[in-house]
Amino acid sequence: MHLFATHFGTYEVAANAVGKPCLKPFRHDPDPAEMGLGYLDLADHPERIRVPMVRRSWLDKGPLAGTSSERGREDFVEVSWDKVSTLVADELRRVHSTHGGQAVFGGSYGWASAGRFHHAQSQLKRLLNLAGGFTSSVNTYSYGAAGVLLPYILGPDYKDACDTSPSWSDIAENCELLVGFGGFRLTNAQVEAGGTGSHRAVEWLRRCQQSGVRIVVFSPAASDAPAGPNVRHIPLRPNTDTAVMLGMCHTLLAKGRVDREFLKRCTVGYAEFERYLKGDADGIAKDAAWASNISGVPADVIAEVADDLHCNRSLVNVAWSLQRARFGEQPFWAAIALASVAGHVGTRGCGFAFGLTAVNSVGQPVRRLKGPVFEQGENPVRHYIPVARITELLESPGSRLAYNGRSLELPDIRLVWWAGGNPFHHHQDLNRLAEAFRRPETVIVTENMWTGTARMADIVLPSAFPFERDDVAASSRDNWLVYSRRVMDPPAGVLTDHEAYCLIAAKLGCLEAFNGGLGTNEWLARVYEGYRDRYPELPDFQTFKMCGFAALDEGEEAPAPADHFGRFVADPQSSPLRTSSGRIEISSEIGNFGYPDIGRHPVWMPPEEWLGAPLARQHPIHLLSPQPAHRLHGQLEHSVASQNAKLNGYERFTLNPADAALLGLRDGQLCELYNDRGRTIAALTLNAGLISGVAVLPAGGWFRPDDQGVDHGGNPNTLTAITPASHLSQATAPNSCLISIRPWCAPTDKQDED
Ligand SMILES: Nc1nc2c(c(=O)[nH]1)N[C@H]1C(S)=C(S)[C@@H](COP(=O)(O)OP(=O)(O)OC[C@H]3O[C@@H](n4cnc5c(=O)[nH]c(N)nc54)[C@H](O)[C@@H]3O)O[C@H]1N2
Ligand SMILES: Nc1nc2c(c(=O)[nH]1)N[C@H]1C(S)=C(S)[C@@H](COP(=O)(O)OP(=O)(O)OC[C@H]3O[C@@H](n4cnc5c(=O)[nH]c(N)nc54)[C@H](O)[C@@H]3O)O[C@H]1N2
Ligand SMILES: [Mo]
């Protein structure tokens, strides 16, 4: 079968009526994602990068002529691959020999494309390691706060928020009540990093409902509550979930319903947390009335759900979005405390979970393919940043950054190379990032489209689309392997990242070391054989290639569900967690780091930007920027599904009708969303299911600032702040953001009307 593998699933390659290749849903996928069907249309899109390009002054005057302030504002000149590979090799050599490897930033975060060999970051990092190393990055934008917090609270086995969930089959069978903070944004489950052959998350949620699991959703948006029976939506103000969870803990405490036996046996630090709940030090009881005041959820509703959590076999799920906010560690930590107090941790399908339906894999009862990747080699440079501190890195060379109990030195970056990611989509406060990007001497970007990031480069290397090359695709959280076979050749001036880096490696004199003496086919066979070493039941490479896919246990009885704390809870002495106490840490040593924004146990702290902040008098709307339903971040922006979801080419944002009326805005109107950091234009869609005071503008619109600095791409990161979740994690926090909204009337439109 001719298949094409993507992060949003597998597609079959067919021919349309006029014989042009097109994509069809994969016949074995019960719930294929529509967004990828138009992917091939991008091949000859006008925004495609077709040849290597160099910014004019950089080409004419070199990297040291002080023209970097023109970056993003100047035109590009076409050059040959021979020329561009010499320019890149020379520039790498210059920076490495003059400044050392730490002066190169190769942290290059991003989702790139599915496929284990043509993985953009691995290709780049292998080359940079051979050239002398680079300053790297750690953690993710997805669950950066959780990834640093959870190893302290649950142990390093739970660093990956995906691994904390019980399996869907256990939830369906044994759980009676599923309480979801942040709810279930089902369009997110279309995606899986590395791909999948079969989308099942939405079907599992439906099966849970059918088998009688009641669902309660706390969210500012009613659309986060699934349709169907036994679902209750409870609106709340953004960033206040921790207060609600604390109010629930207090309710159970006041009613004598705390599971003290569990807390004593399986946790440490509850006594300290209880003193905080009672208000021993600050005189404030964190009771339901207190939480109601903060969150807007009626106190009796908070108390009722708390009782419900205690009296039924229950599971508390928290969406990852809640920790992409200021103090984002707190709702995850508070949920662990709440589930521990309510007393169902260790019961099959119960306790706590993070990110059910955030991506397809969370909770899937499948064997997971742990396989090899394209080896990156050894990085001689030890410097790194937490991934969301890129602006500080570029702005403040030589300064120090507090992170997870350490003090990191921020090196002086002279060269940035980005491949497989789009910081001008994903990072916060893009106007500030643009200024920071004008500081280094050279910026290189490997991309297939003219993204905001490509436009901020000096050297642009055009990259083949994933459907223009062969690869072996697999997710480490899924049971499918797919042979993704080339659908068409790339345009004449475009190479795969690997081919491009072979040219550069040759100029650096390290081609043999870079490609290992292997061609692409041999690399693919080697990657696949690495899987077969671990899973001998997989077919041989030729059979796999012909069939197009292989899947562990697919169609068979689900394998035994993951244990999910069962063994630990049954006998914490002999099956301890790998935390410092061996138990769940309701209070933790992280409080001793002395950071102002994280203490010894979960607390509610008011962010600088939320509806209760003094700043809300100036900018009264809380902006949320969830994942886009019709594309993957900024990828597929130009495909049919993403374009059809817009209004006259503008991104849509949603607002409650009453708020819109107060602001004098009507449905479909173009509006300016603004604050002190930036301005962006989007079209209003009224949504009565959204709590008052909140606007929702999904991420992924392309950053397109005009001469006045107004972004016409509807990118919410024009408005968000770089303020981290905390000093502990230094994680991204775009969901704490206050803005104002007014009608948009373009200056030229006004003239036209006259
Ligand atoms: N406001 C706000 N911002 C957010 C978020 C949010 O919730 N709100 N979410 C954050 C999260 S969770 C994430 S994960 C990030 C995602 O941010 P990114 O991962 O940076 O977003 P993508 O658009 O997927 O960027 C991948 C880029 O790689 C390119 N690419 C694809 N294949 C290849 C290849 O083979 N080679 C090369 N060289 N390039 C390739 C694509 O064209 C694309 O531009 O965004 C974060 N930003
Ligand atoms: N279609 C599609 N799917 C994707 C992606 C994509 O780009 N496109 N990206 C993938 C990636 S990289 C990731 S990390 C995951 C992210 O998965 P999540 O982090 O779960 O996703 P979000 O869409 O940011 O947010 C989910 C919901 O949280 C709610 N929410 C936001 N703030 C609050 C709050 O303070 N309190 C409460 N109670 N609710 C709140 C919002 O209403 C939103 O609908 O999605 C993945 N899935
Ligand atoms: Mo993510």
Image: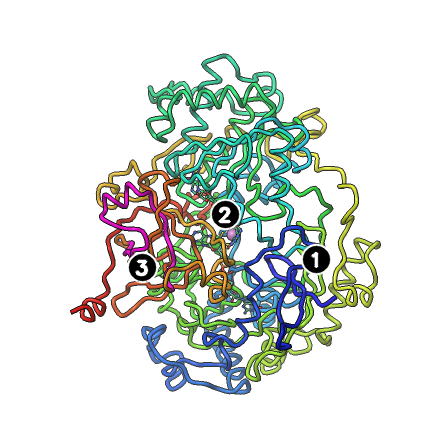
Q: Nearer the viewer, mark 3 or mark 2?
A: 3
Left-right relation of 670 to 597: left
Q: Are marks 3 and 2 in contact (CB under 8 Å)?
A: no
Q: Compare residues 481 and 274 and report the one nearer the observer.
A: 481
Helix, strand or loop at disc 2? helix
Q: Earlier in the sequence, mark 2 or mark 1?
A: 1
Up/down of 739 relative to 580, above or below: below
Determine if the C-beta at disc 1 is less than 8 A from ligand 2.
no
Left-right relation of 594 to 215: left
Instruction: Identify the mark at residue 144; answer none if there is no mark.
Output: 2
Q: Earlier in the sequence, mark 3 or mark 2?
A: 2
Q: Earlier in the sequence, mark 1 or mark 3?
A: 1
Question: In the image, is residue 298 part of the stretch drawn in magenta?
Answer: no
Q: Which residue is mark 3?
A: 681
Helix, strand or loop at disc 1? loop
Up/down of 574 relative to 694, above or below: above
**Magenta extent:** 649-673
Identify which amino acid the numbered label 2 is placed on: Gly
Residue count near mark 2 (Cα–Cα under 10 Å), binned few <14, some 14–19, many ≥20:
many
Which residue: 43% across, 33% down?
241
How far apart are the two marked residues, 2 and 1, measured between alpha carbons? 36 Å
User: Can you give x and y, in whole percent of width and height, for residue 670 in the image?
Assistant: 29, 58
